[in-house]
Amino acid sequence: MAIREKVFNTIISCFKRHGAENIDTPVFELKETLTGKYGEDSKLIYDLKDQGGELLSLRYDLTVPFARYLAMNKVTNIKRYHIAKVYRRDNPAMTRGRYREFYQCDFDIAGQYDPMIPDAECLKIVHEILSELELGDFRIKVNDRRILDGMFAVCGVPDDKFRTICSTVDKLDKMSWEDVRSEMVKEKGLSEEAADQIGQYVSLQGGMDLAERLLQDAKMSQSKQACAGLTDMKQLFSYLQLFQVTDKASAEKVRTTETQVMVASAQKNLLEERLRLTAELWNAGIKAEVMYKKNPKLLSQLQHCEDSGIPLVAILGEQELKDGVVKLRTVHSREEVRFSYTASLSV
Amino acid sequence: MPAFLPSDRVAHHFSPVLSARCQPPCWGKISVHHHHLPPPHVTIWDPNTSTGYSWITLLLNWITPHLAWWTFFLLDCTAAVMPHSQMAIFGCCFLVAFPAAMNTLGMASLLLCAGLAGRRSRLCVRSLRTLSGMTLSQIDEEVAKLLKLKAQIGGDEGKHQFTLKTAKGTRDYNPKQMAIRERVFNTIIRCFKRHGAETIDTPVFELKETLTGKYGEDSKLIYDLKDQGGELLSLRYDLTVPFARYLAMNKITNIKRYHIAKVYRRDNPAMTRGRYREFYQCDFDIAGQYDPMIPDAECLKIVHEILSELELGDFCIKVNDRRILDGMFAVCGVPDDKFRTICSTVDKLDKMSWEVVKSEMVNEKGLSEEAADQIGQYVSMQGGMDLAERLLQDAKMSQSKQACAGLTDMKQLFSYLQLFQVTDKVVFDLSLARGLDYYTGVIYEAILTQTGPVPVAATQNGAGEKAEEGVSVGSVAGGGRYDGLVGMFDPKGRKVPCVGVSIGIERVFSIMEQKAEASAQKVRTTETQVMVASAQRNLLNERLRLTAELWNAGIKAEVMYKKNPKLLSQLQHCEDSGIPLVAILGEQELKDGVVKLRTVHSREEVDVSRAELAEEIKKRTSDV
């Protein structure tokens, strides 16, 4: 949970930096709201038992609820993030280890704007988040549905095969080109020439220069759709340049609490004093803990500090109480300093 | 976005607003029925869709206006009874057409409505051609296409209307509500952390058997999941049973944890109007064997801190102890088997007067009058440590070992509360009972003492705590010690003593939302510090460049998604969203390497160098 909290804080501060609002939706929706939105995956939706009321299902993602929210509240413009759990009845035999309840973290910009600016901001946000999370080097791949469809058209793919060829091309990140090509030709019934032409294109990668080149490409430029997509792609890259995203740990102990100081004593019968000091620390807004024992051993109290990562311990003793001081010890270095009772609060 | 989601279809499917715009401005009843159809490929405006009936109605309307009016008024009445008959068509057309029978607008609406009507029903007059020459079979073809499209979108069990709503008893949280919610959570979590609590999370559903048998009568309010061939599951009803399951499963003997999450109860709306079925609970619990009453005291200290920091107004925390209550019942002559039921009657003292409560005990629960009177003497008592002392000396009460144990611990509790400096708001109240299904020791409830209008939804709150909702209107938190629950889950029956409290967070939300509404201050839904704007044209690139610089410096900034926005719209957005500063770019400023930084509400402007801009913004917004 502590790790999760850190990750959420990083992500949410990035969303807020970009002026996003937050919404939340119920964990279940009317069954009819979710029906017909997920194609084949609909069988993975958790339904609630019919207990005599409305038929309900647990949400499968955060996008359909978002669309429902926009329509219901007649919202035309919003920049929102939504972090919440979603539910899918994945078949464990097929997808071992997959969770059926897991977090999704969505950011969406809804509304009519000048083209590609919000699209660029989304990419900027991904770039910021992945950088700040320090997961290592990363790359963001970009393409456009119109360019894909245009490419399929000029390569001779029949209209009705667009979607299915598209899902085969999608497998290029997992399979080699030969396997993908063979699936296109043998399983999906694509002609060999069409497959080869696609092959020439899908190996292309680049930046704004690639978009420019393709606009000049004899074949590609025949597709109006592809040209529209390529022009927008150039525009996108120009914005990405302005956003400076065209380029791409010390192992610390993860603490589960944020306690700053443990209030302890080495001697017996000092529970009241410990409680009193702890209350004063709490009242001063300091995160403090005290052991729930009348006469705990100093060693156990120190051990607890080590286990929990508490950095300081305030030790009380008869002499110190008479003198009106508190011994403040740094746990890892074992250094001790005496502070007057009142001064110790500010430390 | 999922690859298989045709987004334009989604928008249409969800938007009766969009489809409504395609419909004629009809005075009549017909327009409503078309919500189930997506905007058709053949538009409804098209006069081609008129039927032969439109000719007849026109003719009659010309010849005998009044006769027609009366005749068809009658027909329309019958239409109400036989909605799908041909009479209905006539009647509806005329009801609509009459007000403007003679003018072209009326004529047009007549045709349109006739067309709509023709769409809806199967007409027998196949030989007639329509105004445009489209045959009825062609119309049928179009209708078939639309029905096919509708079938594609998905079954709706024969219903013709798409319902755009959340499930009953649930609601979305809009950005304003989320902003309030975030503030409340931050205050509460800060307090939990100050006391060294960890947080855990559990799944939203549990195995049905985990929840069975823990909630008594309330079990019928549990949401079950459909049997889809796997384990039988139910949505969690509270956070305490999952906590006990977590402890037993992971063999944990000691933990101080908080858990803030939603729980689900199928409350019957007729009985508990306005209650939510999905709502937040905010629990804090200390599990483990410790020296008595210290963790119990810390729970009360936490309640005190949270309620103070939330600034909800004056509050009072009532404490009692299950053993004292049971002991009291025993010495008052209540038979053992009536303990729980008398207890739940006593619990109603916060809502009903003593007379009514006494009468329920005697008349409904069969208690003797003397026993009731003796109980009456005790439950009127309130006090602090002194009351505990007095009761220990009380001739009758001291006969009960159980009560004495409870009273001794109560004294100890108060001594710790004094050290924690919270005794000003805590009161030992013998009338506090609470549902008590699994409480074994101290119990407590916090109520707001200011009276104010209670929003309907706020009568329900998580302070129904450990599996129960019997809280009074002003209640905002509740809890107690429950030593036996974890043992119910542990296969060896190992006990882990627990004490905890649940904050009635929905109630707190309602109060905060009301306060926000009433106050002049706007609740901001974003934290943006500066808007990057320009008054001149063709400065989009410069705006984007500056915005990226600010983001990279960690400044919360926004820019308008327009190549050439008007300065006024940009300033208006700042006013609407509460953004305090705007950084204005212009040709001259760019040449000089400065930015005009304007304070939105005062309109004061000052030139700031580009290099110092981030620092300046941080300085100015640090106290915001």
Image (cartoon, coloured by chain):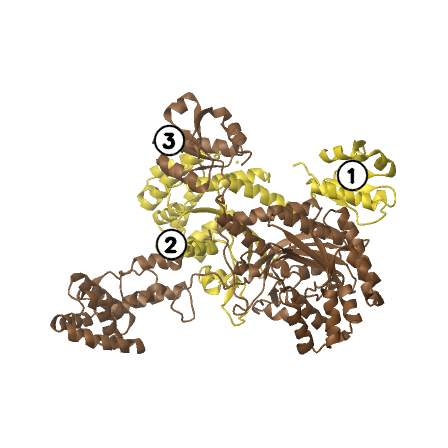
User: In the shown orientation, is residue B505 left or right of residue A278?
Assistant: left
Instruction: Say which residue label 1 marks.
Output: A313
- Residue A68 is situated, as x and y percent measured from the top left of the image, at 44, 56
Instruction: Say which residue label 3 marks.
Output: B539
- Residue B513 is situated, as x and y percent measured from the top left of the image, at 52, 51
Q: Which amino acid does label 1 sit on?
A: Val
The answer to whether residue B236 is visible is yes
The answer to whether residue B289 is visible is no
Q: Which amino acid does label 3 sit on?
A: Leu
Q: Which amino acid does label 2 sit on?
A: Asp
In this rendering, the label closer to the viewer, 1 or 3:
1
Q: Quadrant of the C terminus of chain A?
A: top right
Which label number is shown at residue A190? none
Instruction: Say which residue label 2 marks.
Output: B8
Secondary structure beneath label 2:
helix
**Chain ID of residue with mark 1:** A
In the figure, the shade used to draw chain B is: brown
> Badge 2 local density, few (<14 within 10 Å), some, or many (20+)?
few
- Residue A10 is situated, as x and y percent measured from the top left of the image, at 58, 41
- Residue B206 is situated, as x and y percent measured from the top left of the image, at 63, 63
Chain seen in yellow: A
**Chain ID of residue with mark 3:** B
How far apart marks 1 and 2 lie (CA) works out to 61 Å
Residue B539 sits in quarter: top left
Of B119 and B136, which appears nearest the observer? B119
Of B573 and B133, which appears nearest the observer? B573
Q: In the image, are marks 2 and 3 on the same chain? A: yes
